[in-house]
Image (cartoon, rainbow, N blue to C red):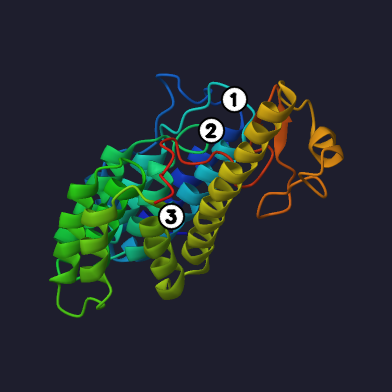
């Protein structure tokens, strides 16, 4: 039986993805090794194989990217790496240059600091710039580049400049220009961060993106609560001459009514007079550069 000429490339392309999945799952190298490579790495090669099925194969690679990111993030390996993440995203967006979701969510995956992600803000920006070249009239790309500069790099002038570029894009929402001004005036404050994440939560068209924004808002709430709890610990230390050993000490002293919980219901930790977020909390880790309250 002869396969139709146009069917062979997509069958082969899907087979490549399947072989890659099997390779990672059985006997493949551990993340971080030099052999941890895609079966097909060249976007041009996979485009030639895909022919008219490039959008379908882009969906396949996007699913692989999401699965790879999720499984690596949940891995208990202390040396886990995310070496395949950018190549998978690059292949996805080469097959479908207008795959907006892959650009926007992929940039978040790439920016997430270890251990929850690779911490590659440079690759996140490169991916978003690729999206801009494909669709220069889409305001979400410069806004997202500004977002990377703001949240993960703490480069507030750069962030404000990109927010202004986004605001100058035809059809951009009105809130972008005030956001740029707020970023310049209050960059690094939790108040301005809340404005940014709240706007994303209000305007996101994808549930994952909206949920990510809500998570970040809860992280900001946790940072406020931690400040308050640390102030209580300082008052206790000043009054009794020693730090509290547990939340029970603070309850007995009348400073608390119960064990304080973070915004998702996980108890905060108190050890050696230090208050912190529990590593088991879905909100962990908090931003590496604590944002000032005001």
Q: CA distance from mark 1 to mark 3?
A: 23 Å
User: Residue 50 sits in which quadrant?
Assistant: bottom left
Q: Nearer the viewer, residue 31 or 187?
A: 187
Give the answer, above or below, for where 123 lies relative to 134: above
Q: Nearer the viewer, residue 18 or 128?
A: 128
At numbered mark 3, what does the secondary structure look like: helix, strand or loop?
Answer: helix
Give the answer, above or below, for where 144 lies relative to 76: below
Image location (x, y in percent) of residue 1: 47, 59
Residue shown at the point (43%, 60%) measured from the top left: 194
Residue shown at the point (35%, 41%) measured from the top left: 86
Image location (x, y in percent) of residue 236: 71, 32
Q: Are marks 1 and 2 in contact (CB under 8 Å)?
A: yes
Say few, some or many: other residues with alpha carbon within 10 Å of mark 1 (under 14 / 14 to 19 / 20 or more). few
Instruction: Classify residue 285 as left or right of residue 92.
Output: right
Say few, some or many: other residues with alpha carbon within 10 Å of mark 2 (under 14 / 14 to 19 / 20 or more). some
Image location (x, y in percent) of residue 54: 32, 61
At numbered mark 2, what does the secondary structure look like: helix, strand or loop?
Answer: helix
Q: Nearer the viewer, residue 141 or 198?
A: 198
Residue at the spot of label 1: 27
At numbered mark 1, what does the secondary structure look like: helix, strand or loop?
Answer: loop
- Report the mark closest to the observer, 2 or 3: 3
Residue at the spot of label 2: 23
Residue at the spot of label 3: 62
């Amino acid at each position: 039986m002869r396969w139709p000429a146009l069917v062979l490339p997509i069958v082969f392309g899907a087979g490549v993805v399947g072989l890659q999945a099997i390779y990672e799952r059985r006997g493949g190298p551990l993340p971080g090794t030099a052999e941890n490579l895609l079966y097909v790495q060249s976007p041009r090669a996979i485009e030639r194989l895909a022919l008219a099925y490039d959008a379908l194969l882009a969906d396949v690679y996007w699913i692989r990217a999401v699965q790879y990111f999720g499984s690596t993030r949940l891995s208990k390996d202390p040396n886990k790496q995310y070496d395949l993440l950018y190549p998978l995203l690059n292949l996805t967006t080469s097959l479908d240059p207008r795959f907006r979701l892959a650009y926007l969510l992929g940039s978040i995956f790439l920016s997430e600091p270890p251990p929850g992600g690779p911490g590659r803000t440079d690759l996140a920006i490169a991916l978003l710039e690729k999206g801009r070249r494909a669709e220069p009239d889409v305001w979400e790309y410069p806004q997202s580049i500004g977002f990377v500069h703001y949240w993960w790099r703490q480069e507030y002038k750069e962030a404000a400049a990109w927010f202004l570029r986004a605001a100058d894009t035809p059809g951009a929402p009105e809130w972008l220009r005030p956001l740029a001004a707020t970023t310049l005036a209050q960059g690094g404050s939790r108040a301005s961060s809340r404005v940014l994440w709240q706007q994303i939560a209000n305007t996101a068209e994808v549930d994952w993106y909206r949920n990510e924004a809500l998570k970040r808002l809860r992280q900001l709430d946790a940072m406020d609560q931690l400040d308050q709890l640390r102030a209580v610990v300082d008052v206790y230390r000043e009054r009794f001459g020693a730090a509290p050993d547990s939340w029970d000490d603070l309850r007995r002293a009348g400073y608390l009514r119960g064990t304080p919980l973070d915004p998702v219901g996980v108890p905060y930790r108190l050890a050696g007079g230090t208050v912190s977020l529990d590593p088991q909390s879905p909100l962990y880790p908090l931003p590496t550069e604590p944002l000032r309250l005001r």
